[in-house]
Image (cartoon, rainbow, N blue to C red):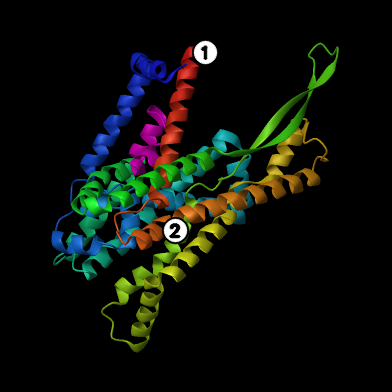
Amino acid sequence: MTFWQKLKTVFTDSTLRKKIFFVLFVLIAFRLLASIPIPGVDIFQLQSLLQGNQFFGLLNIFSGGGLSTLSLAMLGVGPFITASIIMQLLTVMSPRLKSMYHEEGAMGRERFTQISRVLTIPLALVQGFGLIMLLQQQGVLVNPTFLQTAANLAAITAGSLILTWLGELISEYGIGNGVSLLIFAGIVAALPSQISQFSFIFDVAELPLYLGFLALSIVVVAGVILVSEAERLVPTTYANTSRQGSGAGTVHSFLPLRINMAGVMPIIFALAILLFPQLLISFLANSTSGFAVSLVGAMNWFLNSTAVYSIFYFLLVFGFTYFYTAITFDSEAVATNLQKNGAFIPGIRPGVATTAYISKIVSRVTFLGALFLGLVAVLPILMQQLTGIATLAIGGTALLIAVSVILDLLKKIDGAIAMRQY
């Protein structure tokens, strides 16, 4: 089926059309919620705080742009994502959670998600309180009383829970992953302001530089798509016995192992660690303690040293890619499932040998994925250093999220069209 035939099917099939319009309706509701600010905000102080601040820039991505206006959606789906990450990390330490996530099927994953939802509430309260205290210290929230602080905390916590609910509504009644689509909507909503900043500094004399940046952007996006979709196919053989018992044979198949199993999570983990010094600097900026002054000076040196910061950032992303892949992909469980289904890898004995073989392959393909993620993560920094223009940057978390969401959405639409034809 050609692209135009698929596009025609999307708008002529009533079920698929309803799902797409439902997604658009929820995204509009999300943008309206993200435009309602909390009381007592100093707009000029907020703009100066957000300008060039990576800590608030990352939070703004996961809030869907809600932090840039201190709206009711300023926490976004960040608490739910944090809860999901914590639950996945706990599967390493808890055999019960590991069994629930990997072995109990759809029902187990639903219980796992329900625990993540419950954990979202205290995390939203803690993150909201810390963010409000930081904003008050920076003078963004003007003359807050105790009741105003409590009301703001309740409002932004409720906003985060509403966004999580809207994301799950998209996943259930719409098409695509709801939480990812909300983050993607925030990234897209920020594009007009970024384009306007670029047009403001546009210089005809720098036209070759801009054309080179455009070409590099296309190459980077193509590379992200290629690596996101790349798989290492491990050949497998299944025993195939006829139902009449008259004979037996074999069925050859493949076990697909993705090069980038970790997705964007390693960059998020690395940024969480690298943004911690900036958070401490914000809290200790007005301190007169000798130790605090020395600590702030050392952190400022680290953040201002581009080479040291970039190398450390790259190594963190590289290491977290292996770490996250290890906790989300269980080679032993895969080998056990192959053996239970009467399958084996040609030339490899079932059981321990198969586990070791799969682990070795995963380690090798993860090296390529980790190397790629590290390069994409530091690419915005390298671009800004080479061009000297802060707005000329491509790569990082936003690009990976945007490409991953678009690819996933296209796959879901193709699957719905195929199901309709069937």
- Quarter location, residue 389: bottom left
- Residue projecting furthest to the bottom: 290
Mark drawn on residue 422: 1
x and y percentages locating residue 415 in the rendered image: 49, 23
Residue at 33 percent of width and 55 percent of height: 59
Q: Amino acid at mark 2?
A: Val
- Quarter location, residue 298: bottom left
The reply, left or right, for residue 335 in relation to residue 121 is right
x and y percentages locating residue 75 in the rendered image: 31, 52
Residue at 37 percent of width and 63 percent of height: 385
Whether label 1 touches label 2, CB < 8 Å: no
x and y percentages locating residue 322 in the rendered image: 59, 55
How many angstroms separate mark 1 from mark 2 (CA)?
A: 45 Å
Q: Which residue is mark 2?
A: 378
Badge 1: few (under 14), some or many (20 or more) residues near its Cα, within 10 Å?
few
Q: Nearer the viewer, mark 1 or mark 2?
A: 2
Secondary structure under badge 1?
loop
Visible residue check, residue 260: yes
- Residue 179 within the segment the image draws in magenta: yes
Which of these two is toward me, 5 or 288?
5
Q: Amino acid at mark 1?
A: Tyr
**Residues shaded magenta:** 165-184
x and y percentages locating residue 334 in the rendered image: 69, 40
The reply, left or right, for residue 34 in relation to residue 217 is left
Secondary structure under badge 2?
helix
- Residue projecting furthest to the right: 246
- Residue 322 within the segment the image draws in magenta: no
